[in-house]
């Protein structure tokens, strides 16, 4: 469960979203790699799946992409059935579900996202070599 929380926290630091959207990340629908298997992960959640109906579109940094890759390759198979399509499979084991009580920073992530509710969609890339810089551009 520690690795699952580490992945969830790393994603939330770059891609603020409601806990329900985080828990519902689908490996084929919401997590994509437009440039192939060596490219960065892109989180793309359509507006009809977001409470405020604003599309969530984030590019994960190289560091977070590596963490997600390691989780999917090395940890997720230990508790997820092979046919489970979610990044965080719920119900495979009692301790495997990402829940509201398991991520204390969710309120900060949600308030950041709600403050941008009327903004256009944002494509964000966080960091370069040291993941300390942020570059977000508004999309249309």
Image: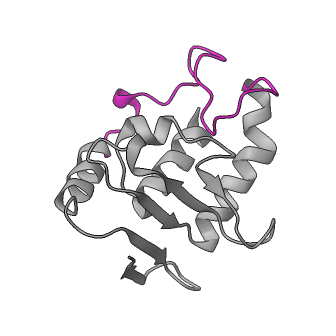
Q: Where is residue 101 in the image (x, y as percent from the top left)?
A: 34, 28
Nearest the eye: 139 or 40:
139
Structure colour scheme: one colour
Along the horizontal axis of the image, is 107 left or right of 94? left
Image: 43 above or below 26: below
Q: Is the magenta region chiefly helix, strand or loop?
A: loop
On whether residue 44 falls in the magenta region, the answer is no
Residue at point 32%, 55% (across, down): 54
- The magenta span reads 80-105
Along the horizontal axis of the image, is 105 left or right of 116? right
Nearest the eye: 109 or 114:
114
Q: Position of residue 121 (x, y in %)?
A: 36, 68
Quadrant of the image occupied by residue 18 = top left
Q: Position of residue 9 (x, y in %)?
A: 46, 50
The C terminus - image quarter: bottom left
Q: Position of residue 74 (x, y in %)?
A: 80, 43
The N terminus - image quarter: top right
Image: 48 above or below 66: above
């Amino acid at each position: 469960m520690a690795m699952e929380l580490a992945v969830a926290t790393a994603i939330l630091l770059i891609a603020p979203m409601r806990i329900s959207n985080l828990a519902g990340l689908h490996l084929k629908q919401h997590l994509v790699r437009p440039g192939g298997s060596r490219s960065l992960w892109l989180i793309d959640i359509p507006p009809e799946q977001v409470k405020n109906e604003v599309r969530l579109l984030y590019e994960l940094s190289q560091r977070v992409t590596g963490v997600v890759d390691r989780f999917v390759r090395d940890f997720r198979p230990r508790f997820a059935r092979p046919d489970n399509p979610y990044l965080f499979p719920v119900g495979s084991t009692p301790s495997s579900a990402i829940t509201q009580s398991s991520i204390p920073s969710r309120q900060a992530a949600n308030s950041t996202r709600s403050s941008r509710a009327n903004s256009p969609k944002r494509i964000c890339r966080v960091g370069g070599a040291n993941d300390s810089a942020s570059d977000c551009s508004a999309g249309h």
